Image: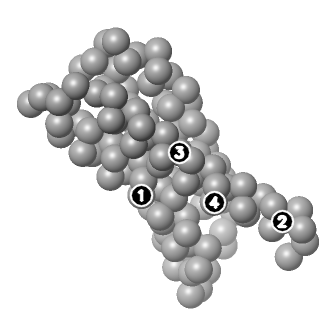
Amino acid sequence: MTNEQNDKKFDLEERTAKFGEDVIKFCQKMPRGPITDPLITQLVKCGTSVGANYSEADDAESKADFKHKIGICKKEAREAKHFIKMIAVAVPALKEEAKPLWQEAKELNLIFNSIYRKVK
């Protein structure tokens, strides 16, 4: 692998880790209650799962395993997008703060969709 490819791989690993961290910080700001508690749980699970599954994909045992793990990454990013939107409805005061997080989830979903389609 060239240095440029290594840098890109590291950047995506770092980017997915940062997304998970940002999700955790965002969720810590939310008020707790019967509506927000399940949303917080779901967002933390899918938001941190993106990076965990990307790490697993990076150590995949085969192309099929790699594609499967990347498929999970794209699904989890899409799910995060959904829960961020639900939280913006449940806690309107966090709507503006949710926008960049939603945008990052969208971009990660598009990146993983592209990778998934390219794997034969």
Q: CA distance from mark 1 to mark 3?
A: 10 Å
> Label 2 sits on what residue type?
Gln
Quarter of the figure with the N terminus? bottom right
Instruction: Bin the neighbour count of mark 4 within 10 Å (Cα to Cα): few under 14, some 14-19, many 20 and up.
Output: some
Q: Which residue is disc 2 drawn over?
A: 5
Q: Is residue 89 left or right of residue 4?
A: left
* Nearer-N-terminus badge (1/4): 4
Q: Which residue is disc 3 drawn over?
A: 19
CB under 8 Å between discs 2 and 1: no
CB under 8 Å between discs 1 and 4: no
Residue 51 image point, x, y percent: 51, 58
Q: Is residue 4 left or right of residue 60?
A: right
Residue 28 image point, x, y percent: 33, 35
Q: Which residue is disc 4 drawn over?
A: 13
**Is disc 1 placed on a helix, strand or loop?**
helix
CB under 8 Å between discs 2 and 3: no
